[in-house]
Each structure stands twice: as C-alpha cells, then as structure tokens.
Image: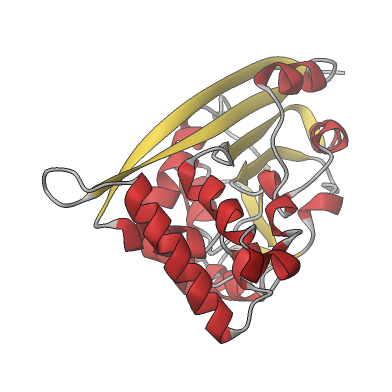
Amino acid sequence: MTDWNADLYLRFAGERTRPAAELLARVPLTRLGRAVDLGCGPGNSTELIAARYPEAAVEGVDTSPDMLEKAKARLPGVSFTRGDVAAFRAEPPADLLFANAVLQWLPDHETLFPRLMRSLSAGGVLAVQMPDNLDQPSHRLMREVAAEPRFAARLGEAGGARARILAVEAYYDLLLPLAATIDIWRTTYCHVLADAPAIVEWVRATGLRPFLDPLDEADRAAFLAAYTARIAAAYPPRADGRVILPFPRLFVVATRREG
C-alpha cells in the first residue's frame, strides 16, 4: 500500500484519540521507566502516554514516514523510530507496550500477542485497542463494491488486507500463561458525523486504503461514488441531518506475570 496520509487521519483526531485515552486510563501502572507506543501514527496516543508518565522514556514506532514526521513535529522531545510492529521486540524490556488501532493490521495473533508479552518487564503492561468493525456496513460495503465486475479483478485481495481479530476467549487463553491479570472489554462508540460523505472521509484514511490504492484515478472516483451511495443508504440522516457511525472496538490490558 502507499504511505499513510497523516493529515487525512487527523481530520477526526478527537474521535480517534478517545479510545486511546480510555485504554490508557485502564493501565494500572502509577510509574514506569520505559513505554513504547506501537503504531504510534501522528503521535496523538504517544502524547497521552508522555503526559501521564512524564518521568518515563517514551518511544514511538511506526512504518509510515508521513506519520512519523507529524509525530516528531508534535513531540520533539520523544524518540520516534521507523519500524515494523510485526517484528518488534523491546530491548531492553519495556514497562508499557501500547498498541492503539494497529494490531488489527497484523496476522498471526497467536504468535504476536505472546511475543509482545515477553517483551515486557515483570509487572509490565500490554495495552491493546483494535477496531472490531469488519462486519459493520462501513466495511462490509467496501467488500461488496470491490466484488463488482468492474473492480473484482484488481481488488480480489483487498478484503484480506486486515486480519479478522480473534474472539475474546482466544485472547484470554493466549495471554493467560504469561499474565498476572487480564482485563478485556468491548465498546461500541456512536460517532455523530456531518453526513454520509463524512463517513467515507473517515475510512479513506484507514480501511479504504487497500481498496483505493490499486485503482487509477478514474476507477478510484467510480469506486468512491458507488461506495458513498451505499453508505448513504446504510446510514440515513437523523432528525438534525447528521448521521451516526457505530464503531465497535476491542480492548485488552494484560499485566506480565512476575518470574
């Protein structure tokens, strides 16, 4: 895929930062030495960590040069590194690994989650938030448009770009051998947006990328027109003309077992 567009992502900065703030609020650590924000994006989640733990060495890791440029401008005192979260190992071990809306892009959670837990110091915390919205109209309709004959040949793999996350019980079982405590919950945010095109603008920065990147300009416009029409039907305006976008997210906070 092409690089992420940080400016487009930040058009809904408040809505995107809220889950990170609520995830961080459930981290039980009062002090820590080292925190790593995995998939830090433009630094909005990193900023929360640095503010809560001013004594900590805070680092951000991301694959996107554009995101990292925005993060460095936002937090010049924080270390940001270009790196692949899929291969990440904390050396030395971290007290907090924070992964807000990133791990859903990675496969093989059966291996990934235990490896991240092993990158924690004893008593350290893995804090994860993942969108759980692949079955919502916003994402189901991407796949439906991609299956239309004019797009299918080029977008046959687009629907698999994001991993389907596991069941709550599976994450519990994966983490249990390494965790002293495990806190898992699911929240559905109901975002009030201006109209159906605003929903399209939201997902263009994230979920739509694998569907739009393989297309030329004309076909991209045709895909967006077909998708926007379906979104308008799936999310009708409320009494004030605005629309509501339900957005389920899964949260996991696990504390590394001593010894």
Residue 144 or 243: which is nearer the viewer? 144
Q: Residue at x 52, y 51 (%)?
A: 141
Quadrant in the picture for residue 121: top right
Residue projecting furthest to the bottom: 217
Q: Residue at x 65, y 65 (%)?
A: 149
Quadrant that contains the N terminus: bottom right
Give residue 63's position: percent from left, percent from top: 72, 65
Residue 213 to residue 128: above or below? below
Q: Residue at x 46, y 48 (%)?
A: 51
Left or right for 178, reference 162: right
One can see residue 35 in this view: no
Q: Residue at x 70, y 16 (%)?
A: 169
Left or right for 177, reference 19: right
One can see residue 250 in this view: yes
Give residue 212's position: percent from left, percent from top: 60, 70
Residue 16 to residue 64: above or below? above
Give residue 18's position: percent from left, percent from top: 40, 43
Residue 218 or 121: which is nearer the viewer? 218
